[in-house]
Amino acid sequence: MNAKQAKYPQLRFKGYTDPWEQRKLKELANIVRGASPRPIQDPKWFDDTSEVGWLRIADVTDQNGRIHHLEQRISALGQEKTRVLATPHLLLSIAATVGKPVVNYVKTGVHDGFLIFEDPKFDREFMFQWLEMFRPMWQRYGQPGSQVNLNSNLVKNQGIILPSMEEQHKIGSFFKQLDHLITLHQRKLAKLKELKQGYLQKMFPRNGSKFPQLRFAGFTDAWEQRKLRDIAEINPKSVIPKHFRYVDLESVVGTRLISFKATEKNHAPSRAQRLAQTGDIFYQTVRPYQKNNYLFEREDTDYVFSTGYAQIRSNIDNHFLMSYLQTPNFVRTVLEHSTGTSYPAISPNSLSKISIYVPPIYKEQYKIGSLFSRIDILITLHQRKLEKLQELKKGYLQKMFV
């Protein structure tokens, strides 16, 4: 790409044809560093009644770069030792979450792990999006030490190609709307996951009880205690086909199968041993607290899973059992029977001896399993929508900026 071509984005709004201009960030704003009172642990710097917040690196991660509220408040004494912002500003994280752009909307003191763009000669939203796109480059520039830090002079001297203020505003507004849509889907997804966790705690017995806290109408019988080996076959023997689709531990996230690798028996890893059958549950035995477990409901006969999973072929409702295996109580019990600290793992034999509580009436099993199956389907749908929106934004960032 020659210099002339580099001044035009691949995709533009109608009516804009002027070339973009090369500038340096220091020409577009007065870039100054935040300041922190020391020692930062001293309580005299903070006051819960103060109207001025205290912006920390952790707040950026929690709010994904758009700061609308701050829990920690800085005292009048602390304000003398920092930079206080009373109006919305663009900032850039230069420590820990290196290169993360921030728009701060609240009155706050700014930690010295941020750069502040004062008196900007750019559209704030446009620059926020450009900095987000440029973030991988900041991380490459980071200076190694006890933690990665970004040199402020590198930021000031960084070149940028940008359009007129009017076109900046149009681009910034477009991406802000897209971000809003992404945030809505993230919230919906988070609420669904929270709903599922609530039901997992209430719809299965806890603390040795034979009765769950919440039940479908019409069911009152005590649940029966059963060992896994009494209600399921663990790791049934099978003959591995010559050609198959291999599923390793990284291939399942949550309850979703996100990838597999087509391979053949002679070249496959030795851990490719679990030939899937419709209805089988594949339980992650390494780091089980991650709860990356999969219920195989496909008709395919050529999926082979890693020995990092226990293959559970149950004789009760498989959706019910799949849900039970995700409950906090069951995961806690599994960890108690696991070995290792960094990578705790449970053996198939130990797993088979763990007891669970099962409704004696199959219809109750089915209703519970169906409920969680529907919730998982909704979670998967929202997850896919979110991923598509994020991918869409990534594509637009590449095409609408130079």
Image (tube, grey):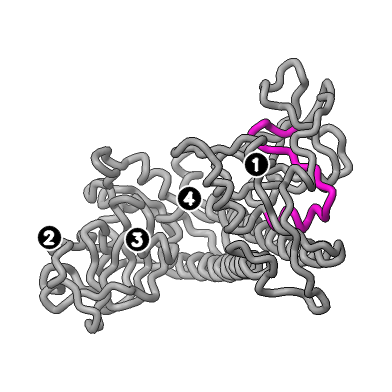
Q: Mark 2 to mark 1: distance in Å?
A: 50 Å
Residue 39, numbered circle: 2
Q: Is residue 384 above or below residue 187?
A: above
Report the span colored magenta: 304-324
Q: Mark 4 to mark 2: distance in Å?
A: 43 Å
**Viewer-proximal residue, 5 or 268?**
268
Residue assigned mark 1: 351
Ranked by sequence position, the earlier of labels 1 and 4 is 1
- Left or right position of 94 against 365: left
Q: Mark 1 to mark 4: distance in Å?
A: 55 Å
Q: Can residue 3 be seen?
A: yes
Residue 224, given in percent of the width and then of the height, sits at: 75, 60
Q: Is residue 305 magenta?
A: yes
Residue assigned mark 4: 402
Q: Mark 4 to mark 3: distance in Å?
A: 31 Å
Residue 58, numbered circle: 3
Ranked by sequence position, the earlier of labels 4 and 3 is 3
Whether label 3 touches label 1, CB < 8 Å: no
